[in-house]
Image: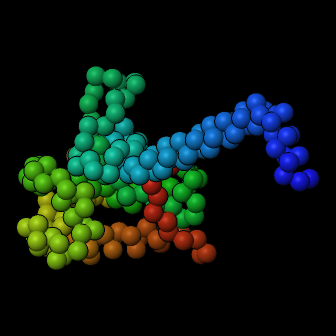
Amino acid sequence: MDSVNIRKLLGQYAFVVFCAAVLLVIGGLALLNRHAQASDEGMNVWYYDLGTNQLFSAAPDSIPPIQAPPDPKKPDVKSEGVRALVFSCGSCRDASKRFVAYVEKYTPEGKAKRELAPEEHATGSRMPASEKELRGIDPEDAHDGLVIAKVDSATPAEEWKWTPKSDDAVAAIEEEAAGRCKEGETLQPCVPRSP
């Protein structure tokens, strides 16, 4: 077909070509929107409800402890949510393989300090030491006021042993978590994802 015939054909079916182009654009926008929503949901982090022993997701810039979502069975009861470090020995999509290695929260003093400098909480651990120094953030204070505990759902959270977070303490807990994996399985950190 030469270009004259194509122009003639397009002229005869201009409305059909226009509708097809509009449908392609709408379909593309719908896919982009769906992908953006999934990406946003994937940006959340896990939290552990100390009252119900259930996981829920929240924004990564939340400073724990936060108020957990209300329990439908007990809507008048308020409980705390603490950041949960969730792992799996395989696919994180398989909820039966996910487990909470430990939880973390700030002491009241540590939380007050972080609320005064939220950008430090949100980016402090990823910020180079030189930039922390320029911003007046002590690189040694990365875990200041942050305490961790291993989850024991058989024991009330008030009785858990909360200890200051340190790289050594986290490494020991993660090593113990890796010991839960069978040979050939790899310990994977998990974040909330869209279904």
Of residues 57 and 19, which is closer to you in this image? 19
Q: Position of residue 194 (x, y in %)?
A: 53, 45
Left or right position of 63 against 46: left
Which of the 4 image quadrants contains residue 69? top left
Q: Quadrant of the C terminus?
A: top right
Quadrant in the picture for residue 101? bottom left
| Residue at image point 19% right, 56% down | 119
Q: Nearer the viewer, residue 57 or 108?
A: 57
At a point 28% along the width and 22% down the height, the residue shown is: 76
- On screen, residue 14 versus residue 98, left or right, reads right
Q: Can I make out residue 159 in this image? A: no
Q: Is residue 68 above or below residue 64?
A: above
The residue at 66%/36% (across/down) is 22
Where is residue 184 drawn, in percent x and y? 61, 75
Q: Position of residue 31 (x, y in %)?
A: 60, 44
Front residue of 157/54: it is 54
